[in-house]
Amino acid sequence: MTSLRAFPSPVNLGVVLSAAGGEEWSVRRTSWESMADFLRQRLPLEEFEAWFAPLQPESTPGGGLTLRAPSQLYADYIRDHHGLLLAELAQAFPTTPVRIVVAKGAEGAQPLPFRPAERSPLNPRYTFASFIAGPSNQFARAAALSVAENPGQAYNPLFIYGGSGLGKTHLLHAVGNHIVAARPGTRVRYVATESFVNELINSIRLQRMPAFRETYRSVDVLLLDDVHIVAGKERTQEEFFHTFNALHEAGQQIVLTSDTPPAAIQGLEERLRSRFVWGLVADIQPPDLETKCAIIREKAHSEGVDLTDDVVLFIARRVRENVRELEGYLNRVLVFLSLTASPPNLETVRAALTPILPEERTVTPQEIVRFVAHHYGLKVSDLKGRDNRRSVAFPRQVAMYLIREVLGLSYPEIGKLFGKHHSTVIYSIDTITESRRSNPSLDATLTTFAEHFR
């Protein structure tokens, strides 16, 4: 066989590159599977899948192993980028000499036409009109709408982050749907980052990178969901870095979503992290009780079902944070009502949800007041008294907020508990709601308090 350049590696490497001869040998997979496991443990998954997975193993006379590469490109890349790793491989498997060869006739093979992996199209149900806004998400919604109305001008990129099931994907689709409706002919591309990674791997393997780059760098709007998935994937980050630059320099709009803010994405290259904050970073927090109730009413109404306030509150209070969980509970209720022809009252809804709900803990308003008073070093009588010093008024507002959030009591009911007019209760709860948005420490404290009672 005609030898290619040897790896710049230690003596007795036992790995060479050569052009394939005509002999055929039986496949010896046991050795290759062990070696593949060795390589997987030392390479990012995408790197292994792109460059080593396509190699075809064949045993050679004398116990050696030949790995046939699809093209010269693969052989050159492995030699140039993984010479030291192959030296380690040779030392780990000293009795199995390995060589990587270029499959005969591979250079003349014509690649198939580039066909991107199937992506989910824009969901027509996910619009700004169907997105229920509240204090927890109104900033992100307003930013997304501004981008949709002025793509490439308002905020570029727009980076939306928040926990799973809070509406990030909904807003991403809403941006796309709005632009397509307002600007026919605009090239909008929505893709989940996992699909982007898979397309990249396949394009590298099949030598279709020019077509891949053309696909992603010729759009007017790129909507990339769950961008945190690129973390730790060196080649993906490299490719996305250049794609980002090409689009941004051309004034094309980029919208990204993530579970965490850019600063908290572990394994993300700094050059990408800095670019993610060039435009605007907007967060989506778990919905408060009012927003959860509004979502339930709207979705039930869209299905032709009107629920009473006690039913809406019952469902809303059972959902901790996730809107997707809320929708799941509501869907179960609607199906139960349809199949049993039962009235949509509290008894029926309770029967529908009891099998899947966690055991309910009985919490009283008095228990919440005692808890808050103890936390702030006060007496219950202080919170229910007339002392309006901030050291007392603020904990009182916190207690009112928690009672509303955890138990769903009405404003008059809370006012009666504290001896206050309901307008005072409304003001107190609004004050805490606004403070929570701008004060991460308070937000974390209130989240901990609420979890204590659930």
Image (tube, helix red, strand yellow):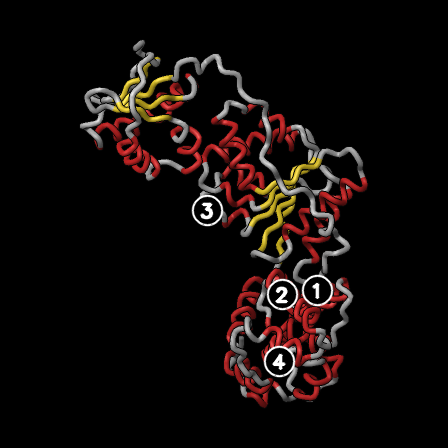
Q: How far is mark 4 from mark 1, CA to CA?
A: 29 Å
Q: Which residue is mark 1?
A: 295
Q: Which residue is mark 2?
A: 326
Foreground: disc 3 or disc 1: 1
Q: Which residue is mark 4?
A: 396
Q: In terms of secondary structure, where does tag 2 sit? A: helix
Q: Position of residue 273 (x, y in %)?
A: 53, 41
Is residue 431 visible to the viewer in this orientation of the structure?
no
Foreground: disc 4 or disc 1: 1
- Residue 360 location, quadrant: bottom right
Callout 3: few (<14), some (14-19), or many (20+) C-alpha neighbours within 10 Å? few
Callout 2: few (<14), some (14-19), or many (20+) C-alpha neighbours within 10 Å? many
Q: How far is mark 3 from mark 4, CA to CA?
A: 39 Å
Q: Which residue is mark 3?
A: 266
Q: Give the residue drawn at x 44%, y 41%.
A: 232
Q: Position of residue 72 (x, y in %)?
A: 41, 16
Position above or below: 389 against 100: below
Callout 4: few (<14), some (14-19), or many (20+) C-alpha neighbours within 10 Å? many
Position above or below: 363 against 8: below
Which numbered disc, 4 or 1, marks the residue that appears first in the sequence?
1
Q: Do tag 2 and tag 1 residues touch (Cβ < 8 Å)?
A: yes
Q: Position of residue 197 (x, y in %)?
A: 52, 37
- Residue 28 location, quadrant: top left
Which numbered disc, 2 or 1, marks the residue that appears first in the sequence?
1
Give the amino acid at mark 2: Leu
Q: How far is mark 2 from mark 3, CA to CA?
A: 30 Å
Position above or below: 284 against 49: below
Which numbered disc, 2 or 4, marks the residue that appears first in the sequence?
2
Q: How far is mark 2 from mark 4, CA to CA?
A: 30 Å
Callout 1: few (<14), some (14-19), or many (20+) C-alpha neighbours within 10 Å? many
Give the amino acid at mark 4: Arg
